[in-house]
């Protein structure tokens, strides 16, 4: 079976320096192996999720039940870790034009309290309901009390109750912590419920019902997705550090962070991976951006994650990346395309750009990417590159699982807890004060 291809040739980190940093991770590699055997009992619980057949069976049973309702559209209500992973995989595999496909189930993500955006979705959904089409609502909030999610849920809850008064609860699936207030409410009102394992944090939850239910409803092959996630864990827990992509990646990011490169740019050369970049941005920001270390000392550490899309952002920020301060480390991500388009041979166009006539678009993309790598190398800008043999369930499972392990290792190197997010609660606390006035 093919695997994701990693190139660590241009990190500008010597082998001896990588060895020194990676050796610090040996206890954490052993710890992660041990944590996997403890299943859902520790903060590393997300690593067991792909190996849990019962969890997948529960999700698939609810999917089968809901598909009998013949839903025309799915509304996913969640924010942050409750929907970014779902969007990342959906966009990568089904594309930006999914809703325009004739036979596809439509999907909308209600992930912010933006009145204008919400009003547009409400009008669309109300039109479907008036015309007799069925909708399926999946509200996702681990705590069950996320302000934005509950606001949006109430709006769509009232809509479905108005147009399907006799059996509105049939069209709602609640994904939350067991015994949260929302869990209890759903149970009291005959709504189907899916449990988020208690120890799995939101940004690590894409392979739980948080991501599996909506993705499965949309036709994603869940078994292949989880198989991909499982397949990379062994590679990412080997003590042979030069065969361990998660350890290598965390080590070089840490090395350059200590040298002053506190910005990590994920530069994806596929528009369909843009949402993967946004998922990764949350994973990095919440996991390693910490005010205090594990001992409680004030440290204020963190790598700032940015996302760039090739080739679009070569014409927006490449000037900064290649001419600005040496405060960035880059991970390039490329994919092997599913489709091939060849340029027609129109002679006059050769006067605009030479040497493109009759060539494939993917060849041109690869040439541009080769030029980018050469420019970075010539200017001493460090990077690694990751190439996906295909954009499918298996390799997306590998890619997201790899990045979650990478961040666990990076948190260990920075001596911070990668599983909490205490400062996120600060804005929530202030919001509740304002709402009470």
Image (cartoon, grey):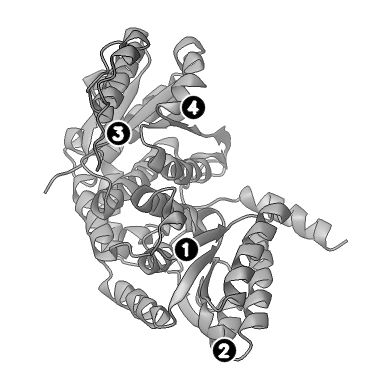
Q: Is residue 148 above or below residue 24?
A: below
Q: Which residue is mark 4?
A: 263
- Compare residues 265 and 52 and report the one nearer the observer: 265
Per the model, the C-alpha gap separating discs 4 and 1 is 36 Å
Q: Secondary structure at mark 4?
A: strand
Q: Which residue is mark 2?
A: 167
Q: Which residue is mark 1?
A: 106
Per the model, the C-alpha gap separating discs 3 and 4 is 20 Å
Q: Which residue is mark 3?
A: 334
- Compare residues 250 and 415 and report the one nearer the observer: 250
**Which-is-in-front pick, marks 3 and 1?**
1
| 376 sits to left or right of 194 | left
Per the model, the C-alpha gap separating discs 2 and 1 is 21 Å
- Sequence-first tag of 3 and 2: 2
**Disc 3 and disc 1 in contact, CB within 8 angstroms:** no
Q: Secondary structure at mark 2?
A: loop
x and y percentages locating residue 9 in the rendered image: 23, 21
Q: What is the crowding at mark 4: few (fewer than 14 residues within 10 Å), some, or many (at least 20)?
A: some
* Residue positioned 37% across, 57% down in the render: 44
* Residue positioned 31% across, 72% down in the render: 56
- Compare residues 264 and 152 and report the one nearer the observer: 152
Q: What is the crowding at mark 3: few (fewer than 14 residues within 10 Å), some, or many (at least 20)?
A: many
Q: Secondary structure at mark 3?
A: strand
**Which-is-in-front pick, marks 3 and 2?**
2
Task: Give residue 256's quadrant in the image.
Answer: top left
- Sequence-first tag of 4 and 1: 1
* Residue positioned 48% across, 20% down in the render: 315
Per the model, the C-alpha gap separating discs 3 and 2 is 46 Å
**Disc 4 and disc 2 in contact, CB within 8 angstroms:** no
């Amino acid at each position: 079976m093919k695997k994701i291809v990693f190139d660590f040739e241009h990190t500008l980190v010597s082998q001896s320096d990588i060895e020194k940093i990676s050796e610090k991770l040996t206890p954490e590699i052993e710890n992660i192996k041990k944590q996997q055997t403890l299943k859902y009992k520790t903060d590393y619980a997300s690593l067991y999720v792909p190996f849990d057949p019962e969890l997948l069976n529960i999700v698939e049973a609810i999917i089968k039940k809901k598909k009998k309702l013949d839903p025309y559209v799915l509304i996913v209500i969640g924010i942050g870790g409750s929907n970014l992973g779902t969007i990342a995989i959906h966009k990568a595999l089904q594309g930006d034009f999914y809703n325009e496909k004739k036979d596809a189930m439509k999907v909308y993500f209600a992930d912010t309290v933006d009145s204008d955006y919400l009003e547009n979705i409400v009008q669309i959904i109300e039109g479907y309901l008036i015309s007799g089409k069925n909708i399926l609502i999946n509200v996702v909030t681990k705590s069950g009390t996320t302000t934005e999610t509950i606001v949006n849920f109430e709006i769509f809850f009232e809509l479905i109750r108005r147009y399907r008064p006799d059996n509105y609860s049939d069209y709602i699936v609640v994904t939350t912590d067991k015994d949260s207030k929302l869990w209890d409410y759903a149970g009291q009102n005959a709504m189907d419920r899916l449990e988020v394992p208690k120890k799995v944090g939101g940004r690590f939850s894409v392979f739980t019902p948080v991501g599996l239910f909506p993705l499965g409803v949309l036709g994603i092959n869940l078994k292949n997705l989880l198989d991909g996630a499982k397949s990379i864990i062994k590679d990412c827990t080997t003590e042979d550090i030069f065969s361990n992509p998660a350890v290598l990646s965390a080590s070089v990011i840490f090395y350059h962070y200590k040298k002053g490169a506190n910005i990590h740019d994920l530069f994806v050369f596929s528009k369909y991976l843009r949402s993967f970049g946004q998922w990764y941005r949350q994973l990095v920001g919440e996991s390693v951006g910490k005010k205090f270390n594990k001992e409680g000392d004030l440290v204020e550490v963190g790598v700032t994650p940015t996302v760039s899309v090739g080739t679009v952002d070569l014409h927006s920020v490449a000037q900064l990346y290649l001419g600005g301060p040496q405060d960035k480390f880059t991970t390039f991500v490329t994919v092997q395309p599913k489709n091939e388009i060849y340029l027609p041979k129109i002679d006059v166009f050769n006067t605009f750009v030479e040497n493109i006539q009759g060539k494939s678009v993917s060849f041109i993309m690869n040439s541009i990417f080769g030029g980018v790598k050469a420019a970075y190398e010539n200017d001493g800008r460090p990077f690694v590159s990751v190439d996906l043999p295909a954009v499918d369930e298996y390799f997306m499972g590998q890619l997201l699982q790899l990045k979650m392990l990478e961040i666990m290792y990076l948190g260990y190197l920075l001596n911070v807890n990668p599983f909490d997010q205490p400062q996120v609660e600060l804005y929530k606390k202030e919001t509740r004060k304002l709402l009470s006035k």
